């Protein structure tokens, strides 16, 4: 029996997830779509899917057993709360929400429901290279981790749609989440430095340098560049007491021509993390079919939101601390990470 899924938001990643759910993965059927741009929803809808007028109509439809949210971050809260009220498992693209208050409202609703329903789209946790890197750190064979260098470069971002807060509340959230997960640790404070601006970024602060202070004392430096032109380049290196563990260079075709011998770089996140997105949905489908969720949780979305909020405050200089509420038991023991 296939799980019947409805998709909210049929833009870039909504369309990519529809392709994945209809052409790559099995055990799932996309039965409904919706978007404020109804023409876009109709164009993206698989043949058998109904185009719903609103997210609420899609979520409450008896046809839809589980929901995938791919709308813009500020729209996520209302859609998540409607899914939780309907008791339907929901995959929500990152960011979970865009404010601490919204994250707390979603968490309160899920805790009151009494079972996990939400998985957040932190796909790096499903990437085979990041999983191998975590296994090395967790094995303890390099001693304790001390520093993590995370590089997050986008060739470009959509003009007009990608606003000035987004390097910190839409892009940095991936680095914050992967740091918490890799190091099994929480972020307790944030500093931000804004260097010389790239002339390619218009009004955006680009690049941005962020320093995350972890509860254990580990420091995480993050380079966010969102207009770097040459490709989508994600790097990660952890310095430990007796060695260093890093993500490998991605296997890619070697091109030889009059410019020399070179390795292709992914164009964007769709290409770099293609297998990770497939795997995150494989795991989501198993849990959703059982009426629940595993993997990155509302708690993880909340923790990343607090990092983004603190980073936005820290842009004007200084250290901004982060104070998490006590972790509800629904999300596991105090510092353990899911998935
Ligand atoms: P997009 O602008 O291409 O698409 C968003 C779509 O949502 C648009 O079609 C828009 O009309 C629709 N929408 C917005 N608000 C809505 C609402 N209230 N109800 C119904 N539809 C609504 O953006 P995108 O790049 O596809 O990003 C969508 C989400 O996915 C964002 O939260 C983004 O951060 C996330 N994302 C995650 C990754 C990743 O690597 N995990 C990559 C890209 C985007
Ligand atoms: C986008 O929304 C993503 O999530 C990508 O993974 C990230 O690299 C990019 O900066 C975001 O805008």
Image (cartoon, helix red, strand yellow):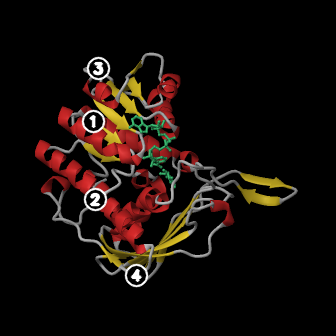
User: 147 or 157: which is nearer to us?
Assistant: 157
The residue drawn where x is 53% and y is 48% is: 161
Mark 4 lies on residue: 318
Q: CA distance from mark 2 to mark 3?
A: 33 Å
Q: Quick check: can you spot residue 197?
A: yes
* Earlier sequence position, callout 3 versus callout 4: 3
Q: Which mark is residue 22?
A: none
Q: CA distance from mark 2 to mark 1?
A: 26 Å
Mark toward the viewer: 1 or 3: 3
When the figure is inspected, residue 149 is found, relative to residue 124, above or below; the finding is: below
* Earlier sequence position, callout 1 versus callout 3: 3
Mark toward the viewer: 2 or 3: 2
Mark 2 lies on residue: 100
* Earlier sequence position, callout 4 versus callout 2: 2
* Left or right: 180 as drawn, with respect to 263: left
Q: Quick check: can you spot residue 228?
A: no
């Amino acid at each position: 029996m296939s799980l019947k899924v409805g998709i909210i938001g049929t833009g870039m990643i909504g369309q990519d997830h529809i392709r994945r759910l209809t052409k790559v993965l099995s055990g799932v059927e996309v039965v409904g779509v919706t978007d404020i741009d109804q023409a876009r929803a109709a164009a993206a809808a698989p043949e058998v899917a109904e185009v719903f007028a609103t997210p609420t109509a899609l979520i409450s439809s008896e046809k839809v057993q589980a929901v995938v949210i791919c709308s813009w971050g500020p729209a996520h809260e209302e859609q998540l709360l409607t899914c939780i009220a309907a008791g339907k498992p929901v995959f929500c693209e990152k960011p979970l929400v865009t404010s601490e208050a919204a994250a707390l409202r979603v968490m309160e609703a899920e805790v009151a429901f009494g079972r996990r329903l939400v998985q957040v789209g932190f796909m790096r946790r499903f990437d085979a290279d990041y999983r191998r890197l975590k296994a090395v750190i967790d094995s303890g064979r390099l001693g304790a981790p001390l520093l993590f260098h995370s590089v997050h470069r986008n060739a470009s971002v959509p003009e007009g749609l990608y606003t000035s807060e987004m390097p910190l509340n839409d892009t940095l959230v991936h680095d914050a989440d992967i740091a918490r997960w890799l190091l099994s640790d929480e972020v307790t404070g944030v500093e931000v430095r804004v260097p010389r601006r790239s002339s390619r970024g218009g009004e955006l602060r680009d690049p941005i340098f962020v320093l995350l202070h972890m509860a254990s004392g580990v420091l995480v430096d993050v380079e966010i560049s969102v207009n770097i032109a040459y490709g989508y380049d994600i790097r990660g290196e952890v310095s430990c007491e007796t060695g260093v563990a890093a993500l490998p260079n991605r296997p890619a075709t070697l091109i030889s021509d009059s410019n020399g011998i070179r390795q292709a770089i992914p164009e964007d996140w769709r290409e770099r993390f293609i297998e990770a997105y497939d795997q995150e949905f494989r795991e989501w489908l198993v849990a959703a079919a059982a009426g629940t969720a595993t993997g990155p949780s509302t708690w993880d979305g909340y923790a990343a939101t607090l990092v983004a909020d603190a980073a936005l405050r820290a842009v004007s200089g200084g250290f901004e601390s982060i104070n998490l509420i006590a972790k509800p038991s629904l999300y596991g023991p105090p510092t353990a990470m899911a998935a």
